[in-house]
């Protein structure tokens, strides 16, 4: 049965030091409120899993939450580098982190395999690339039926999956629309799931389009308005391109980054207060 909890309570209950956390949302519906709450609670030694680890993982890496990052394409979309990710990789700041890099297709296959309860994903890919030189978990196997050489990687089976969506109903069914990534696969592959939503409504269904993730797959729903900011939630608010551009300035220097995070994330009570402080200082 799906529980309805405050985000701080859900994170404290399910996100434990040393666990693996998938925070998914492909350019859209990125669960920033949950990421900020993990930072606020000072949870460390996490294995972070995500396609396109943009600002949400840059913040978590820079604040020392991550021991390992499993990812595909790390960058600030439309702007440039993720300076905290890059600093961790190149200089071990704030500490050494293990990096496991994949292509988007491999990440998607690994989540789909995890959702199916399989130990590995088997697909066509990586042949003729340099990925196997930097990732020893990429292996090649022979198909027992055709003799074709195929690629195998471990499936993703995170302890916790966190996603953001537009709506959930009072039974725990989740509705999302717009550009989607591997949110439903991440939820099905995980031991438990936390879904933050813009609003809780009486009921959701697929008659107006979109995707419904059924309540039996969702452990916790947390209402978190503007919970994807600075990414966007179709039908609710647009992407804050200005914030993505300013993030490069905020995060380039480690000390300046830490000072900014202490003011806007660590010292605030919740994501709403964080957004209010951003608005007060002209970031929103």
Image (cartoon, rainbow, N blue to C red):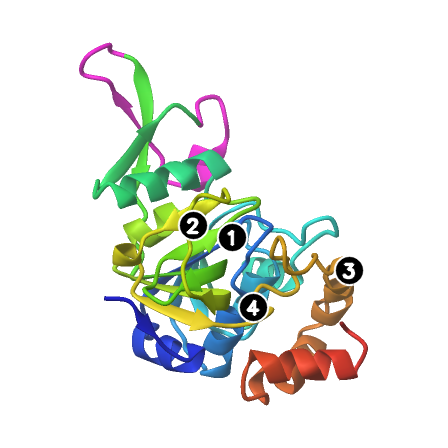
**Contact check, label 1 and label 3, Cβ < 8 Å:** no
Q: Which residues are magenta?
A: 126-147
Of helix, strand and loop, which mostly describes the magenta segment? loop
> Tag 3, which secondary structure?
helix
Q: Answer left or right for 262 relative to 34.
A: right
* Residue assigned mark 4: 227
**Contact check, label 1 and label 2, Cβ < 8 Å:** yes
- Residue 197: x %, y % from top left: 49, 65
**4 or 3: tag closer to the N-terminus:** 4
Residue 30: in magenta span:
no
* Up-down relation of residue 68 to residue 64 (above or below): above
Callout 3: few (<14), some (14-19), or many (20+) C-alpha neighbours within 10 Å? some
* Residue assigned mark 1: 25
Residue 180 seen in the current view:
yes
Choose between 49 and 112: the one closer to the eye: 112
Q: Total marks drawn?
A: 4
Q: Residue at x 30, y 58 (%)?
A: 215
As measured in the structure, the alpha-carbon distance from the residue carrying label 1 to the one carrying label 4 is 12 Å
- Report which quarter residue 148 is drawn in: top left
- Residue 26: x %, y % from top left: 54, 48
**2 or 3: tag closer to the N-terminus:** 2
As measured in the structure, the alpha-carbon distance from the residue carrying label 4 to the one carrying label 3 is 19 Å
> Tag 4, which secondary structure?
loop
Label drawn at residue 245:
3
Q: Residue at x 31, y 17 (%)?
A: 149
> Tag 1, which secondary structure?
loop
* Residue assigned mark 2: 183
**1 or 3: tag closer to the N-terminus:** 1
**1 or 2: tag closer to the N-terminus:** 1
Label drawn at residue 87:
none
As measured in the structure, the alpha-carbon distance from the residue carrying label 1 to the one carrying label 2 is 6 Å
């Amino acid at each position: 049965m799906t529980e309805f909890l405050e985000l701080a309570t859900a994170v404290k209950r399910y996100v434990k030091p040393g666990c693996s956390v998938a925070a998914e949302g492909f350019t859209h519906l990125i669960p920033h409120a949950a990421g900020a709450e993990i930072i606020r609670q000072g949870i460390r030694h996490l294995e972070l899993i995500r396609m396109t680890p943009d600002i949400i993982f840059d913040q978590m890496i820079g604040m020392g939450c991550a021991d390992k990052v499993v990812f595909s394409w790390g960058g600030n979309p439309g702007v440039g580098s993720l300076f905290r990710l890059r600093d961790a990789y190149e200089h071990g700041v704030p500490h050494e982190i293990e990096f496991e890099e994949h292509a988007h297709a491999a990440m998607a296959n690994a989540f789909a395999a995890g959702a199916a309860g399989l130990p590995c994903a088997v697909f066509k890919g990586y042949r003729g690339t340099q990925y196997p030189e930097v990732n020893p978990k990429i292996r090649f196997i022979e198909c027992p039926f055709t003799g074709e050489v195929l690629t195998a990687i471990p499936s993703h089976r995170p302890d916790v999956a966190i996603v953001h969506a537009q709506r959930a109903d009072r039974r725990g069914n989740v509705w999302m629309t717009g550009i989607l990534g591997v949110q439903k696969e991440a939820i099905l592959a995980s031991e438990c799931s936390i879904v933050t939503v813009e609003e809780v409504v009486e009921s959701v269904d697929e008659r107006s389009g979109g995707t419904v993730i059924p309540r039996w797959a969702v452990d916790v729903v947390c209402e978190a308005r503007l919970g994807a900011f600075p990414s966007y939630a179709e039908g609710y608010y647009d992407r804050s391109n200005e914030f993505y551009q300013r993030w490069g300035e905020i995060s380039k220097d480690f000390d300046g980054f830490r000072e900014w995070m202490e003011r806007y994330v660590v010292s605030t009570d919740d994501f709403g207060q964080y957004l209010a402080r951003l608005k007060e200082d002209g970031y929103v």
